Image (cartoon, grey):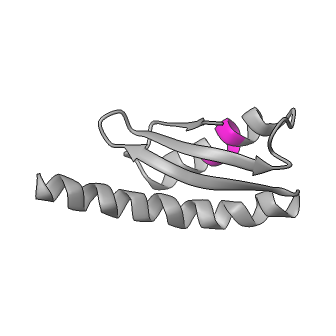
């Protein structure tokens, strides 16, 4: 179990690093993206969109075509990204 915990922590660190890079662009538009968690069994990253992203017509597009695609490109363990309120 300890090995899985270490692996999960490693993946979460990579996810946070990518999100930090993406956050720069999101903040330029008045929004923000917060890492909430990673479900290793499903490969699902959970985030919370904040600021101008809340209620924005393009938030879903940004989430799937920007955040999800980028995370999947750099971290193969990631299969999807979902936003929670």
Q: How many marks?
A: 0
Quadrant placement of the C terminus:
top right
Write the residue at 62% across / 55% down: 34
Outermost residue on the left side: it is: 1
Query: In the shown orientation, is residue 34 left or right of residue 59?
Result: left
Write the residue at 84% across / 35% down: 55
Residue 40 lies in quadrant: top left
Seen in the picture, residue 41 relative to 19 is either above or below; the reply is above
Please check the rendered image and state whether residue 36 is part of the magenta-colored stretch, yes or no: no
Seen in the picture, residue 35 relative to 68 is either above or below; the reply is below
The image shows residue 39 at horizontal and vertical percentages of: 37, 40
Seen in the picture, residue 37 relative to 18 is either above or below; the reply is above
The image shows residue 36 at horizontal and vertical percentages of: 52, 49
Q: Nearer the viewer, residue 58 or 56?
A: 56
Write the residue at 62% across / 66% down: 20
Q: Which span is picked out in magenta? A: 63-67
The image shows residue 21 at horizontal and vertical percentages of: 64, 67
Write the residue at 74% across / 67% down: 24
Query: In the shown orientation, is residue 55 left or right of residue 81?
Result: right
The image shows residue 70 at horizontal and vertical percentages of: 59, 50
Q: Main secondary structure of the magenta part?
A: helix
Query: In the shown orientation, is residue 28 left or right of residue 59?
Result: right
Query: In the shown orientation, is residue 78 left or right of residue 35?
Result: left
Q: Nearer the viewer, residue 81 or 84?
A: 84
């Amino acid at each position: 179990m300890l090995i899985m915990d270490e692996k999960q922590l490693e993946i979460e660190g990579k996810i946070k690093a990518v999100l930090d890079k993406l956050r720069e662009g999101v903040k330029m538009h008045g929004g923000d993206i917060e890492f909430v968690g990673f479900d290793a069994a499903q490969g699902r990253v959970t985030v919370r969109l904040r600021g101008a992203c809340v209620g924005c017509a393009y938030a879903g597009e940004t989430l799937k075509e920007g955040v999800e695609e980028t995370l999947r490109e750099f971290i193969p363990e990631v299969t999807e990204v979902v936003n929670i309120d």
